């Protein structure tokens, strides 16, 4: 057994040997190369309308589409890890439990200390939300708040309130870790709380569901959203992600993505939305089974079919327009004859005809077109005619746009009213601006139906789970 003196004398040699072994066992590949070799990009995100959610045809959300595109550019699959809160997401990435966070992370000076951020892909403003009403006065600043203010715990909104507290010493608020910003908007709408704070993009996507809610004032200047990565010495992944965002920006792909999720939210019809929400309760139940049945027959989302029917007739099977189109799907006489619809005022025949017509138009567009863009191009064609939409796609190409995206085609549809343009087309003049309004209205109606049916499904899942957890109790026959 070696003496203590000999061990002490040889200690540096032992340490050098240990360091050499550790170095030999360490992975010398770059962070980026490790991801490519394993064939998987691990992304932390959150469940929300602005980030990621399960749509009828699979995963959706701007953050998901953006991150999926990055994974595709690397030639790897994407693996999602859904965090319950932003605080959890940032803690997980700081502990190296994933490759990056794509969850609408606001870039702040404090977060920059321990995280790397890609170039921003969107800017948002923090807004104070309240519910309008005869008995409710709109606050003009923090000093006029009179009621319960609640925000998400440990969020950027919570931190902003802490900053404001130094100036407004009477400011009080509560926090929750169980709800997100969209949930808190629901509580304001139901008057369970008086105010909340949310980001402008979250408000835009959710205000159609709560038409009584309003922005009182902004609590910040526009702040950037970006992907967050751990601060490794190896910056290969950070550089690749940053280059990807820059490329998306320069090519216009990022603008197309933002338009896909937010383009229809700019024009908000308060009266129309309130009326629509009421008709969902009073009129839709009578026809919902027909929309669901024929949607399966023709492969069309029933909620889209119902949204189109509402735009056409407000779910009134007796509706007749001044131009002679009739029924719940407002079919022309020629279209009805083409589809084999004998009675346009019969809801069964009309909805079947509408679903069939949509399916036929859908098939006319190239399969290379993204399903979301293809859907809105088909809806526009339902209104204005496939030929006019094809004319507009040609115009779009001539003007340097992307004829496969609704965003670019939408910009050019109004040109069909101008002689300079329609005289060069195959199908001539059309009221393209009205087709744009038609599609944007249906996008809003569709979003609301998706939101409501998602709530229904969650409620059903909760009831099923509760039933499964009930104890098996034997009730005496005498009772």
Image (cartoon, grey):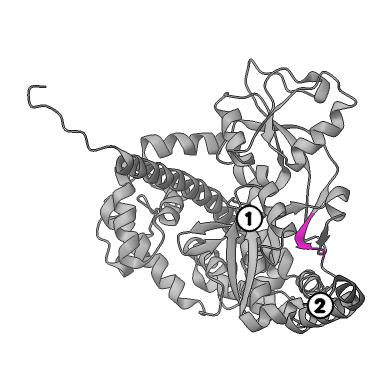
Tell me where the magenta segment starts and ends, as one range.
Answer: 225-231
Labels 1, 2: front one: 2
Tag 1 near tag 2, CB within 8 Å: no
The percent coordinates of residue 437 (x first, y second) are 59, 53
Q: CA distance from mark 1 to mark 2?
A: 62 Å
Q: For the N terminus, give its image quadrant.
A: bottom right
Query: In the displayed structure, does residue 259 sit left or right of residue 179?
Result: right
**Residue nearest the observer in this picture, 428 or 149:** 149
Query: In the displayed structure, does residue 235 sit left or right of residue 394?
Result: right
- Quarter of the view holding residue 66: bottom right
Q: For the C terminus, give its image quadrant.
A: top left
Query: In the displayed structure, does residue 164 sit left or right of residue 241?
Result: right
Q: Please identify the dominant SS of the magenta region.
A: strand
**Residue 163 seen:** yes
Indicate whether residue 230 is drawn in magenta. Answer: yes
Residue that label 1 marks? 51
The percent coordinates of residue 150 (x first, y second) are 67, 29
Local secondary structure at mark 1: loop
Query: In the displayed structure, does residue 189 sit left or right of residue 342?
Result: right
Residue 444, above or below 473: below
Local secondary structure at mark 2: loop
**Residue nearest the observer in this picture, 234 or 2:** 2
The percent coordinates of residue 90 (x first, y second) are 72, 53
Residue 137, above or below 56: above
Can you name the residue that lies furthest to the left here? Answer: 478
Can you name the residue that lies furthest to the top here? Answer: 135
Residue that label 2 marks? 2
């Amino acid at each position: 057994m070696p003496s203590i003196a000999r061990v002490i004398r040889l200690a540096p040699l032992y340490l050098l040997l240990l360091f050499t072994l550790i170095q030999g066992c360490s992975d010398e590949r770059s962070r980026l190369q490790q991801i490519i070799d394993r064939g998987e990009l691990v992304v932390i995100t959150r469940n929300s309308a602005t980030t990621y959610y399960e749509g009828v045809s699979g995963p959706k959300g701007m953050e998901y589409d953006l991150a999926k595109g990055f994974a595709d550019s690397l030639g790897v699959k994407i693996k999602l890890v859904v965090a319950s809160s932003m605080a959890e997401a940032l803690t997980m990435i700081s502990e190296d439990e994933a490759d990056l966070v794509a969850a609408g992370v606001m870039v702040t000076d404090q977060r920059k200390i321990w995280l790397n951020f890609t170039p921003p892909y969107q800017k948002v403003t923090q807004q104070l939300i309240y519910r309008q009403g005869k008995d409710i006065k709109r606050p003009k600043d923090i000093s006029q708040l009179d009621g319960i203010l609640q925000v998400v715990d440990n969020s950027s909104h919570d931190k902003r309130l802490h900053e404001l507290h130094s100036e407004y010493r009477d400011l009080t608020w509560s926090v929750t870790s169980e709800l997100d910003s969209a949930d808190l908007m629901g509580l304001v709408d139901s008057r369970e709380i008086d105010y909340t704070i949310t980001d402008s993009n979250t408000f835009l996507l959710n205000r159609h569901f709560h038409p009584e809610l309003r922005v009182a004032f902004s609590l910040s200047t526009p702040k950037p959203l970006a992907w967050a990565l751990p601060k490794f010495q190896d910056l290969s992944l950070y550089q690749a992600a940053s280059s990807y965002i820059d490329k998306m920006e320069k090519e216009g792909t990022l603008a197309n993505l933002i338009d896909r999720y937010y383009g229809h939210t700019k024009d908000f019809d308060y009266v129309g939305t309130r009326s629509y929400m009421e008709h969902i309760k009073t009129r839709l139940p009578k026809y919902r089974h027909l929309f669901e049945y024929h949607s399966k027959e023709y492969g069309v989302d029933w909620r889209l079919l119902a949204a189109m029917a509402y735009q056409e007739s407000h779910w009134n099977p007796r509706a007749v327009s001044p131009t002679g189109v009739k029924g719940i799907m407002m079919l022309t006489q020629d279209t009805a004859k083409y589809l084999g619809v004998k009675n346009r005022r019969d809801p069964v025949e009309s909805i079947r005809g509408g679903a069939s017509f949509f399916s036929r138009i859908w098939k006319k567009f190239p399969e290379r077109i993204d399903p979301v863009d293809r859907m809105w191009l088909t809806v526009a064609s339902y209104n204005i005619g496939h030929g006019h939409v094809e004319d507009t796609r040609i115009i779009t190409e001539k003007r340097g746009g992307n004829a496969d995206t609704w965003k670019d085609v939408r910009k050019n549809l109004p040109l069909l009213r101008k002689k300079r343009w329609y005289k060069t087309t195959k199908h001539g003049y059309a009221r393209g601006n009205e087709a744009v309004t038609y599609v944007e209205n249906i996008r809003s109606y569709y979003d609301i139906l998706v939101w409501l049916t998602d709530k229904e499904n969650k409620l059903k899942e909760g009831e099923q789970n509760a039933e499964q957890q009930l104890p098996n109790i034997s009730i005496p026959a005498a009772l």
